[in-house]
Amino acid sequence: MNKLELQKVAVEVRKGIVTSVHSAKAGHPGGSLSAADIFTYLYFEEMNVDPKEPKKADRDRFVLSKGHTAPGLYSTLANKGFFPVEDLKTLRHIGSYLQGHPDMKHIPGVDMSSGSLGQGISAAVGMALAGKLGNEDYRVYTLLGDGEIQEGQVWEASMMAGFRKLDNLVVIVDNNNLQIDGSIQEVCSPYPIDKKFEAFNFHVITIDGNDFDQIDAAFKEAKATKGMPTAIIAKTVKGKGVSYMENQVGWHGVAPNDEQYAVAMEELGKAGEALCQK
């Protein structure tokens, strides 16, 4: 896909995020919206995945380590064709397969159940190591929150990844600078994030994670990097795409009401129309 096509898909992904969280009257829109461009690039450009064969052996793997941003992953999977977009409205409803956190047993396209913060990267490292031991050529991607990397297990997993030279692994940190209790500097600063990953023998790339040109260049660089895993520090805007949510910590885990939903969908609709005129 070219940049314009990716931008159009990202708008649809954002619409799905807002719609699903509004329908559920619960969920995490802020961090889902900040990562929407990363989700879009991974599933529509980068990864070898097939909605018709979600468990194919040679597929690339993705682990959503910050599992509470499931609305972002679900919307991307739906727009890719893993399940109907209409099902996004059933998020968190009783009887729905779209639970509040990713469930690999019931949701097509989900490679790892996640939600306990800090643990997803360990699963991703295990998958990447298994690929190396089995001489497989699939790649593994995992998305972490910048608040999540305050968890110690993240760095144990990173130590293993660097030690085992897992160049089939890409760790992405959604660095939107906000977590549930406020800015990450105020809660428990993980900065400098880049130097920490470098210390664990990662190749580190820092980008604007809402800019598709920079996203594209980073993933190409990661694929060309041999002998060490890559960490992409993606500086993003929490709530990106919905004006009243942007950089507002209060939208970490709150659903929009009917009026707010209408405003968000109008803004996203206009953004999509503007892209169609390019």
Image (cartoon, helix red, strand yellow):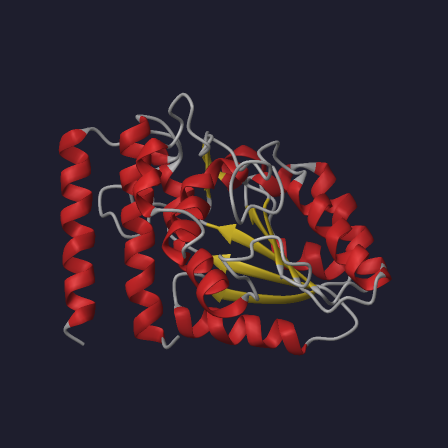
206 displayed left or right of 87 = right
Answer with the quarter of the image where residue 30 lies. top left
User: Picture coordinates of residue 27 (x, y %)?
Assistant: 39, 31
Give the residue at the far front of this rendering.
52
User: Picture coordinates of residue 276 (x, y %)?
Assistant: 18, 70
Question: Is residue 161 in view from this perspective?
Answer: yes
> Going 66% across and 78% down the picture, which residue do you hit?
224
User: Picture coordinates of residue 251 (x, y %)?
Assistant: 34, 35
Looking at the image, residue 121 lies above or below residue 134: above
> Going 39% across and 50% down the picture, which residue do you hit?
78
Q: Quadrant of the C terminus?
A: bottom left
Looking at the image, residue 119 lies above or below residue 34: above
Looking at the image, residue 102 lies above or below residue 34: above
> Going 27% across and 48% down the picture, which residue do you hit?
15
Question: Is residue 35 in view from this perspective?
Answer: no
Answer with the quarter of the image where residue 255 lies. top left
15 displayed left or right of 212 = left
User: Picture coordinates of residue 3 (x, y %)?
Assistant: 35, 74
Q: Nearer the viewer, residue 139 or 217?
A: 139
Q: Nearer the viewer, residue 39 or 189?
A: 39
Q: Nearer the viewer, residue 177 or 135?
A: 135
